[in-house]
Image: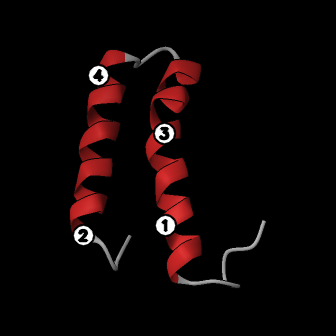
Amino acid sequence: MAAHPKEAQKYAELKRSLKEKFEFNRDAYTEGKTKIITAMTRRAREEMPGRYVP
């Protein structure tokens, strides 16, 4: 995230909004982050091959 501060900001904003919406529903909060986390992980793997290996 350090290499992409705008994306980090979007993620922080998403987390805040999900916290407000799903404060007592951890599963929904996590589900709400899945799409962005998947995209960020994919991008990191593309930008740094070999570093982020499952």
Of pointers 2 and 1, the one earlier in the residue sequence: 2
What secondary structure is marked by label 1?
helix
The reply to whether callout 1 and callout 3 are in contact (CB within 8 Å) is: no
Q: Looking at this view, is 32 or 21 the one in front? A: 32
Badge number at residue 20:
4
Cα separation between marks 3 and 2: 18 Å
Residue occupying the point 28% across, 36% down:
16
Of pointers 4 and 1, the one earlier in the residue sequence: 4
Task: Quickly name the residue at label 3.
Answer: 35
**Number of dots carrying numbers:** 4
**Could you tell me the amino acid type at mark 3?**
Lys
Q: Nearer the viewer, mark 2 or mark 1?
A: 1
Badge number at residue 43:
1
Residue occupying the point 59% across, 72% down:
45
Of pointers 3 and 2, the one earlier in the residue sequence: 2
**Mark 2 Cα shell of 10 Å, populated few (<14), some (14-19), many (≥20):** few
The reply to whether callout 2 and callout 4 are in contact (CB within 8 Å) is: no
What secondary structure is marked by label 3?
helix
Q: Classify 6 as above or below 3.
A: above
**Could you tell me the amino acid type at mark 2?**
Pro
Of pointers 2 and 4, the one earlier in the residue sequence: 2
Residue occupying the point 26% across, 29% down:
17
Residue 43 at what x, y percent from top left?
Answer: 48, 67
**Could you tell me the amino acid type at mark 4?**
Glu
**Mark 3 Cα shell of 10 Å, populated few (<14), some (14-19), many (≥20):** few
What secondary structure is marked by label 4?
helix
